[in-house]
Image (tube, rainbow, N blue to C red):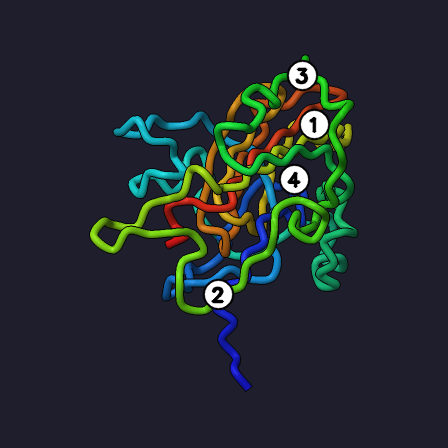
Amino acid sequence: MKKNFDRYFQSSITRWYFTNIQSREIMKNKTAEIIRSYMPYLILISLLGLLPAVSGSDRPEWDDPSVIHIGTEKPHATMMVYPTALLAKIGDRTRSPWFKSLNGDWKFHGAMRPADRPLEFYREDFSDTAWRTMPVPGSWQMHGFDIPIYTNFVYPWPQEISKPPQVPYDFNPVGSYRTRFTVPPGWAGRKVYLHFEGVDSSFYVWVNGRRIGYSEDSRTPAEFDLTPHLRPGVNLLAVEVYRFGDGAF
């Protein structure tokens, strides 16, 4: 049976969680080869981060091969911290008091091309009351927005043979996500990280209206330090996901 399902595109957020840790080691070895495919669904883990860097060109980060991450933490081995050795041996991160899942229904808006996305959706005074919801984790093509594409040897958008690969602008679905969360009182004085286990394929992150980072490379985690951006009570998290980025080819 053919085992290589090369291209099944599904842009989405599949799993979020908070880890509250004071020390950490790094998270995932980079895949040895660039697979010309998209897996059936994506994974997001998050920890919020630093200020975005400025690209050397006028192109957006998702169309600039010189930019891969902005404001992310360095990769490290998968880990979680626990208050006792017993819980650490059990290894169930959901039982740690320093873990918070952000899974659930998020407010969602989908646009079929970047030019049609809501530009200031990350603002705290932006109203998302008319938006639908999208499950996280989830694949937006399986929930009524955009279409899944399977192809095992050609690009899912037109390419000019005489030119280098180019990211599409006319057909490049963008998902805008919003959710609110509260940091547990027991986390006071500790580092708080937002961890994305995987996002297909490029995304920006804002916390309380402030852009804290960008990442691409959908098969590896991205992590951001949220600590300086949080406040007591309710916080707003906004994520903008692009289906195709400069890594899509």
Identify the residue position indicated by label 2 in the image: 151
Distance of mark 4 from mark 2, alpha carbons? 40 Å
Q: Picture coordinates of residue 218 (x, y %)?
A: 49, 52
Distance of mark 4 from mark 1, alpha carbons? 10 Å
- In this view, the residue in front, 203 or 94, is 203
Q: Secondary structure at mark 2?
A: loop
Q: Earlier in the sequence, mark 1 or mark 2?
A: 2
Q: Residue at x 42, y 37 (%)?
A: 169
Label ID, residue 20? 4
Distance of mark 1 from mark 2, alpha carbons? 49 Å
- Left or right, residue 130 beside residue 42: right
Q: Earlier in the sequence, mark 4 or mark 2?
A: 4
Identify the residue position indicated by label 1 in the image: 188
Identify the residue position indicated by label 3 in the image: 126
- Label 1 vs label 2, nearer the camera: 2
Q: Picture coordinates of residue 239 (x, y %)?
A: 59, 33
Q: Picture coordinates of residue 234 (x, y %)?
A: 75, 22
- In this view, the residue in front, 104 or 133, is 133
Q: Secondary structure at mark 4?
A: loop
Q: Residue at x 59, y 28 (%)?
A: 227
Label 1 is placed on what type of residue? Ala
Label 3 is placed on what type of residue? Phe
User: Looking at the rendering, in which quadrant would you find the N terminus?
Assistant: bottom right
In this rendering, is residue 77 above or below 237? Answer: below
Q: Earlier in the sequence, mark 3 or mark 4?
A: 4
- Whether residue 228 is visible here, answered yes or no, is yes
Q: Residue at x 46, y 35 (%)?
A: 214
- Whether residue 191 is visible here, answered yes or no, is no
Label 4 is placed on what type of residue? Asn
Label ID, residue 202? none
Q: Are marks 3 and 2 in contact (CB under 8 Å)?
A: no
